[in-house]
Amino acid sequence: MSGDSLDAFARQKLNSLEAKSLRRNLTVTHRLSAVEVERSGRRLIDFSSNDYLGFSQHPKLKEAAQAATADYGVGSTGSRLITGNHPLFRELEQRLAALKDSADCVVFGSGFLANSGIIPALMTERDAVFLDELSHACIFYGARLTLGAQHIFRHNDMDHLRELLTAHRANHPHALIVTDGVFSMDGDLAPLGTLGTLADEFDAWLMTDDAHGIGVVGDGRGSSFANGADHHVPLQMGTLSKAIGGYGGYLCASQAVCELIRNRCRTFVYSTGLPPGPIAAAIAALDLIEADPDMAARPLRLARSFTRALNLPAAESPIVPVVLGDTDHTLTAAKMLEEDGFLVVPIRPPTVPEGTSRLRITFSAAHQEAQVERLAQTIRDRVMGG
Ligand SMILES: *Cc1c(COP(=O)(O)O)cnc(C)c1O
């Protein structure tokens, strides 16, 4: 039977992952609060989630999602172009556009859907995409779907990007430069000032993925507004699935670009609109961020006190990598932290480059300072070897 060879194929692939300590498993995680989870019968302080503001559990967001579900139902019933465009979308898009200093905004089903749709909607096989090597997987996925050229520059290396633009830009009608605004596994920021200057100089379009920037850097407005970045980024993509607490993706751009996306982007046109609940929750999240800039600053403040305690380079975002290199060593360290009551999920290839397995530690406004101090002490004593 053909199913036999299919199963043999799958088993052989899984075995080869297992041999490299790269086979992964789903673990049921029961969330007790914004920073506490129960896993395999153990209560753990969570230092791995992307819930930077604790919004996944916030009463105001739950209330908003419940009210929207009661008013409009659990699903949107169709693509937004057919029947799925319930009234809350427009309100959220206007709020996001204002937050990002953009004329318009389009909300997508997720961040992954946004990137994998936006890039091929703008670029053809005759064009070129220039990408930072540490950009998120869905940016690479979107770039590949253009069927055009891809030029990958070394992480945050603006000289290398200039070299690539000099060598290749003239061969293509259009060029797009894409980067994470805040890098998801390293926590550092892209040099948006220089990127903007290079984009102007070489007539390339600049796109940032601010999945880890919105809500937590630049007074909650994201990486385009942090570190004195003053260059307008014409394509600001992001997600509602991290600091915003729920689920969804967005693109903030000009009216013409957003209108083109609503017409031509396959992951927008051919996918069902998000349900009303997460849209209402996202609006409530923006209310809270705008009302309390100090809350938006807290995760980074906690990350900085952690990097100070361990003599690591100062955190630039609420994401702090402790790179251990070896995958088995990283798995052991994570297991040991779990025994001490911390959830710090090990990150290994292909999520990060070969030889850079790490503990990726994330900070939330809902963490207490004492919890951060205790984690730093445990890592100092038990992972970094005292
Ligand atoms: C998480 C993430 C995404 C995907 O967003 P989802 O809403 O989870 O699909 C995209 N880009 C980056 C940099 C991310 O970290």
Image (cartoon, rainbow, N blue to C red):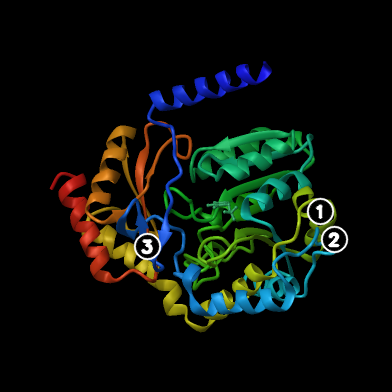
At numbered mark 1, what does the secondary structure look like: helix, strand or loop? helix
Label 3's element?
loop
Q: CA distance from mark 3 to mark 1?
A: 36 Å
Instruction: Give the CA distance from mark 2 to mark 1.
Output: 7 Å
The mark that comes first in sequence, 3 or 1, is 1
Q: Residue at x 25, y 60 (%)?
A: 308
Which percent across, then down, holds residue 354?
42, 31
Is disc 1 surrounded by few (<14), some (14 to 19) or many (20+) residues within 10 Å? some
- Residue 340 visible in this rendered orientation of the protein: yes
Residue 53 picture quarter: bottom left
**Amino acid type for the residue under numbered disc 3:** Phe
Which residue sits at x=65%, y=34%?
150
Looking at marks 2 and 1 on the same chain, the residue that comes earlier in the sequence is marked by: 2
Q: Please tell me which of labels 3 and 2 falls first in the chain.
A: 2
Q: Is mark 2 within 8 Å of ligand 1?
A: no
Residue at mark 2? 81
Residues 333 and 212: in front is: 333
Above or below residue 194? Residue 323 is: above
Q: Are marks 3 and 1 in contact (CB under 8 Å)?
A: no
Answer left or right for 92 relative to 220.
Answer: right
The residue drawn where x is 36% and y is 38% is: 357
Q: CA distance from mark 3 to mark 2?
A: 38 Å
Q: Which residue is mark 3?
A: 363
Name the amino acid type tagged 2.
Leu
The answer to whether the residue labelled 2 contacts the one labelled 1, judged by CB atoms less than 8 Å apart, is: yes
The spot of residue 167 in percent (x, y) is 65, 32
Give the residue at mark 1: 269
Position of the N terminus by quadrant: top right
Please identify the residue farthest to the left as the structure is shown: 386
Please identify the residue farthest to the bottom as the structure is shown.
291
